[in-house]
Image: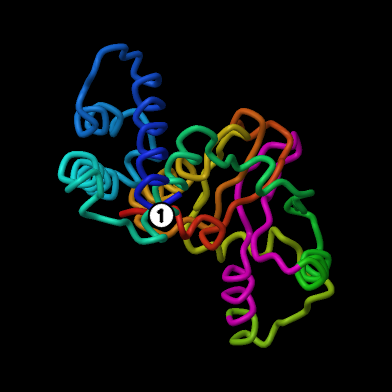
Amino acid sequence: MTNAQKFIDYYNELDKAFAKALGQLEYVPFSQRISELISRNPVVRRYKDDLYQLGNLRNAIAHHSKGGIPIAEPYQETVDLIEKILQDFKNPKRVIPAFQFDVFRVNSDTPLINLLQEMNAKDFSQAPILDADGKVIEVISSNTISRWLFAEYENQLIDLTSAKISDLMPHIETKKNYALISRNTTVYEAAEIYLRKSKEKKSKLDCLIITHNGKPTEKLMGIVCIEDIAEYLMD
């Protein structure tokens, strides 16, 4: 099977998937389906420019051929792209189970040395701070620790053994610099939330915290950092 044939097959399947999502039974131009889905689907928003171009390529292959031979033969990268868009539209990757793990959390009385030991052993840079009721109230990051260390160094007061998380909290640069998301959030939605919340805070978020329904009182299921969703970001 040629790349042109593979491309047309993926295109037709994607067009049907778009029509189904829109509840359309009649023929509607592919470009119109894209326009109608942009406001509804984060995968379409992410790839809208590519989708319009892929639609143009399909028209060139399907309608402008000599003797049944397509005048355009897509590169393998183009075939791979439309296949990825199709798969992501039909079955988008979700933050759970993709980023599910046992989240290390702290409270105001947690010794700093405990957090440092966990960060060193498990190689993470953010930890949620919970109140007495188990509700997320803040995030402590390696940047916060660095600012606290410098302040203590200037005052010649560094004592890692007695320091607690409460000592570091005044050194959090941007308060509540995180967002809560539900377990069913797709990676594309997570990327959009990250960008939107970062603009609102005027600061790049430290992380996205995953709970069952995105509520601060629920069990923590995972954390998403910018590095985890970098490929899905679009600004």
Placement of 71 over or under 30, stated as above or below:
below
- Residue 134 falls in which quadrant of the image? top right
- Which of 38 and 115 lies nearest the eye of the viewer? 38
| Residue type at numbered disc 1 | Leu
- Which of 157 and 221 lies nearest the eye of the viewer? 221
Q: Where is residue 216 in the image (x, y as percent from the top left)?
A: 63, 35
**Residue range (magenta):** 123-150
Q: Where is residue 93 in the image (x, y as percent from the top left)?
A: 57, 42
Question: On the picture, is 42 further left or further right than 155?
Answer: left
Placement of 36 over or under 158, stated as above or below:
above
Placement of 140 over or under 39, stated as above or below:
below
Q: How is the image coloured?
A: rainbow
Q: Position of residue 7 (x, y in %)?
A: 37, 46
Q: Would you say residue 147 sits in the magenta stretch?
A: yes
Question: On the picture, is 161 further left or further right than 140?
Answer: right
- Residue 214 falls in which quadrant of the image? top right
Question: On the picture, is 67 further left or further right than 158?
Answer: left
- Which of 220 and 183 lies nearest the eye of the viewer? 183
Q: Position of residue 61 (x, y in %)?
A: 24, 46
Q: Would you say residue 2 sits in the magenta stretch?
A: no
At numbered mark 1, what does the secondary structure look like: helix, strand or loop? loop
Q: Which residue is drawn at 38% across and 25% down?
A: 16
Placement of 93 over or under 75, stated as above or below:
above
Number of numbered discs visible in the structure rendering: 1
- Which of 193 and 5 lies nearest the eye of the viewer? 5
Question: On the picture, is 159 further left or further right than 55?
Answer: right
Residue on which the image places disc 1: 233
